[in-house]
Image (tube, rainbow, N blue to C red):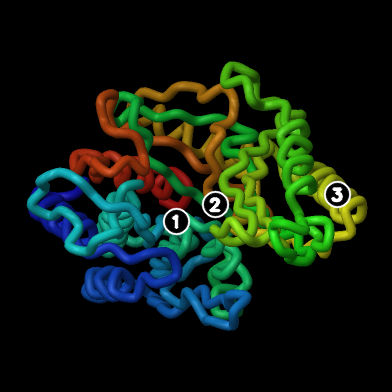
Amino acid sequence: MLTNAQLCDLIAFRQRLHRYPDLSGEEIQTAETVEAMLCPLQPNELVSGLGVWQEPDGKMMGGTGLVASFDSGLEGPSLLFRCELDALPIDEIGDLDYRSAIETKAHLCGHDGHMAILTGLAMRLAARRPKRGRVILLYQPAEETGKGAKAILTDKRFAPFMPDYAFALHNLPGLRLGEVLLKSGSMCCASRGVRIRFEGKTSHASMPQDGLSPDEALCASMSGLKALANGLDPDQALDAHFKLVTLTHCQMGEPAFGVSPAVGEIWATLRTVSDEAMGELVEQAEHLVKAQAAQYGLTLSIEYDDIFAACTNAHKTTEMVAQALSSLAFPCHDQGEPMRFSEDFGLFGHHCPSTLFLLGSGEHQPQLHNPDFDFPDSLIGCGVEIFEKIIRQTLG
């Protein structure tokens, strides 16, 4: 158990992170704050600067990920526990003493609390290392954009830390404080953003026939993309055939009355339960818009962003979590069907058995990504306790 002094330190740490948030791929100050907390705990290894990637415009991003390992020195499995570093590009409202000091940036998803939980776990491991194997604590950048997990997993410096089992939690408003939702199998949906750009030729608005407008291709594509979805009913079960296409943005030409436009863009989010179903939906969407471009003689470009793999909980690691919850007498409920939202933890399941579970942050808590959300500090000890029990029952 954490001491009262440690809990006070973790609350102050969490509130400091909350006050000075960083956006995805830019978590330099956050990573430095975390590293300053970890160094005195003397992990066997502490590696920073992980998870660099290059944007299409050539800009280098990330490089803010951290790993701290606590090693027994004896043979045994490696257990990884992951949290997230990034905040959201949203203005926070409210009158908290530690309200975000940076306009348009705020920890409104609870990642500050997740970092506090993992750091509390580091405190417990510093006091008592595992009897066998090792524990790896990963502070991951860019969860909100779906770029951080891939950047970490493809970083050569992370290769020595590739685990045998991986675990993560996420707080969930609407669920009683400290209660857990857990399930084996499909946990969170795969999703990706797609930018579709049609390009033709401008003309004077009085002579549109002399140009090549994307208007009809845009209209037909938007209707066609929505028709690919079968998940518009909020009560529909999320089964293997679930597909959702959400149109999020559309733009055509310039805001002018005298020009028949040449360029039109559609942004949409594709969502499925599995990666396999996502592949099918992507193929259908591309076939649709390629046909429209060909019919109207337009140039077409397709780009993808915010790519999240489906999060699928392995039976082995889910049983490990369930056993820990049972021994702690934590209330745990079967989640039932997958969550519609995505989580940048799914890729870890491509490398080892992994499980993400949901920890209730209060029935009357504002929803995630709301401008008045704040992670409850009373949840820090709960998260530490669950993670540590998984370690002790597996590694001793």
Q: Position of residue 241 (x, y in %)?
A: 76, 29
Indicate which disc residue 345 carries. 2
User: Looking at numbered disc 3 in the image, what kind of residue is underneath it?
Assistant: Gln
* Residue found 64% across the figure and 18% down from its top: 236
Choose the circle earlier in sequence order: 3 or 2. 3
| Marker count (numbered) | 3
One can see residue 323 in this view: yes
Name the side, left or right, on which 351 lies relative to 281. Answer: left
Choose the circle earlier in sequence order: 3 or 1. 1
User: Looking at numbered disc 1 in the image, what kind of residue is underneath it?
Assistant: Arg
Is the residue marked by circle 3 packed among few (<14), some (14-19), or many (20+) residues within 10 Å? Answer: many
* Residue found 24% across the figure and 50% down from its top: 92
Identify the secondary structure beneath mark 1.
strand
Which of the pair 199/371 is nearer the observer?
199
Which of the pair 1/115 is nearer the observer?
115
Dot 3 corresponds to which residue? 292
Choose the circle earlier in sequence order: 2 or 1. 1
Is the residue marked by circle 1 packed among few (<14), some (14-19), or many (20+) residues within 10 Å? Answer: many
The extreme front residue here reads: 206
Dot 1 corresponds to which residue? 82
Q: CA distance from mark 3 to mark 2?
A: 35 Å
**Badge 2 vs badge 1, beta-carbon distance below 8 Å:** yes
Identify the secondary structure beneath mark 3.
helix
Q: CA distance from mark 2 to mark 1?
A: 8 Å
Name the side, left or right, on which 94 lies relative to 225. Answer: left
Which of the pair 375/78 is nearer the observer?
375
Residue 297 lies in what quarter of the image? bottom right
Residue 299 lies in what quarter of the image? bottom right
Q: Position of residue 315 (x, y in %)?
A: 63, 36
Identify the secondary structure beneath mark 2.
loop
